[in-house]
Image: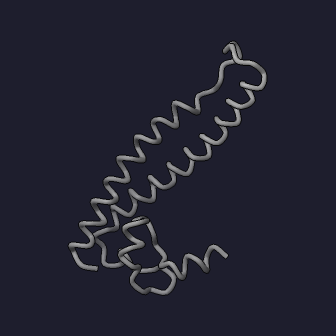
């Protein structure tokens, strides 16, 4: 992977980090407890609690991706960045631009998910 590609990936990581930080801020506001004195009907309260549960799940996944992107940014100048941890082949630039935190190539990632 050449320096131009690494710079392109670095820019992608920084843009994704900014987006995720805003998303996490919004989700944290949406996952605050629903107070019992709030004037919602029984079904509306259940719907709100269901939506809150979904938002918690998305928040957890967003925080995990934020950590992975931060780690990728720390590794980007290391020689092993962009090399699959399983087969030790170079991870394609397309995958690295789509998911810069990737540590496996598409083939190894598919095998790991089975």
Q: Residue at x 47, y 79 (%)?
A: 105
Q: Residue at x 67, y 39 (%)?
A: 53
Q: Is residue 37 above or below residue 30?
A: above
Q: Is residue 2 above or below residue 56?
A: below
Q: Is residue 99 above or below residue 92?
A: above
Q: Is residue 6 above or below residue 44?
A: below
Q: Quadrant of residue 46?
A: top right
- The residue lying furthest to the left in this view is 4
Q: Determine whether, in the image, residue 38 is placed left or right of residue 64.
A: right
Residue 63, image x, y percentages = 50, 48
Residue 69, image x, y percentages = 41, 58
Count of numbered badges drawn on the protein: 0
Residue 27, image x, y percentages = 52, 37
Q: In the rendered image, which quarter contains the N terminus?
A: bottom left
Q: Determine whether, in the image, residue 64 is placed left or right of residue 93.
A: right
Q: Residue at x 32, y 60 (%)?
A: 12
- The structure's colour scheme is one colour
Front residue of this view, candidates 104 and 79: 104
Q: Determine whether, in the image, residue 34 is placed left or right of residue 77.
A: right
Residue 21, image x, y percentages = 40, 43
Q: In the rendered image, which quarter contains the C terminus?
A: bottom right
């Amino acid at each position: 992977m050449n320096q131009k590609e690494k710079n392109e990936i670095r820019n992608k990581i920084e843009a994704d980090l900014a987006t995720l930080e805003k998303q996490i801020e919004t989700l944290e506001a949406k996952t605050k407890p629903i107070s019992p004195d709030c004037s919602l009907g029984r079904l509306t309260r259940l719907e709100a609690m269901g939506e809150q549960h979904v938002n918690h799940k998305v928040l957890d996944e967003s925080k995990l991706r934020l950590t992975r992107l931060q780690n990728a940014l720390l590794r980007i100048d290391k020689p092993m960045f962009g090399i699959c941890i399983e087969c030790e082949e170079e991870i394609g630039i397309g995958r690295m631009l789509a998911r810069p935190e990737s540590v496996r190539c598409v083939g190894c990632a598919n095998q790991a998910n089975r």
